[in-house]
Amino acid sequence: MPTLTLRVSDELALQFASLAATEGGKSALIRRLLESAVGAPGSKRAPVAVGAPQKVTVRFRESELAQIGEMAAARGMTRTQWITSLVRSRLGAPAQQSDGEREALRAIARELNRIGGNINQIARAANGGEGGAVGGSKSGLDDARVALEALQGELKDVLERTSTYWEGR
């Protein structure tokens, strides 16, 4: 991704930093200004939430509260966490993962680390000229490829479940 650099006065830099603090940061604000200037479609990134949290009170009927409680419990969340996640997802914030989804992502990360270690061992054997090990390295790479493809599918599934849930699909 290209980088743009420019020089401005200290005063302008301070004013811009002050404005940017309420708009998700300097990079995010510059990106949105550039997109607007060239007529590019807006970024899907939501502005970073700033300021102190504020309390909002909403009223639900008993049956609605029971439904919200059930839906929150199914995701491993409190009602407040579930409602907050729903609103934030509609505002464009990253989707919130349930405890099960977070654990699935952690398991995938652990497995990717293990496969990375195996690939490093294969590369060392191939580079070190270990004759017997090099012949077996093709089989090891094939096994790693299959495992990576399976993990890619699992990762897509977890991320798709999360995004489709909060987008209401």
Image (cartoon, rainbow, N blue to C red):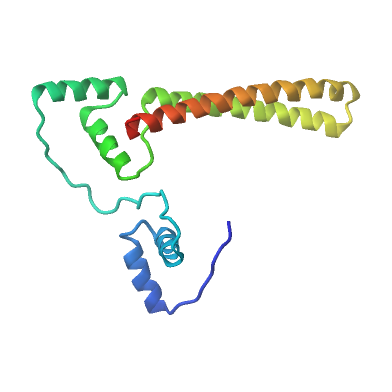
Pick the quarter of the image with the N terminus.
Answer: bottom right
x then y, percent, for residue 50: 29, 53
User: Which quadrant holds residue 119?
Assistant: top right
- 113 to the left or right of 139: left
Pick the quarter of the image with the C terminus.
Answer: top left
Nearer to me, 91 or 168: 168
User: Which quadrant holds residue 9?
Assistant: bottom left
User: Which quadrant holds residue 101?
Assistant: top left
- 130 to the left or right of 85: right
Nearer to me, 124 or 97: 97
Nearer to me, 91 or 28: 91
Count all numbered tags in the image, as a single digit: 0
- 163 to the left or right of 88: right
Q: Which residue is drawn at 51% across and 73% down?
A: 6
x then y, percent, for residue 100: 40, 22
Q: Residue at x 32, y 39 (%)?
A: 89
Does residue 139 sit above or below 165 in this rendering? above
Does residue 28 sit above or below 142 in this rendering? below
- 118 to the left or right of 92: right
Q: Residue at x 64, y 22 (%)?
A: 147
x then y, percent, for residue 122: 77, 28
x then y, percent, for residue 98: 36, 27
Q: Is residue 110 visible?
A: no
Q: Residue at x 33, y 59 (%)?
A: 23
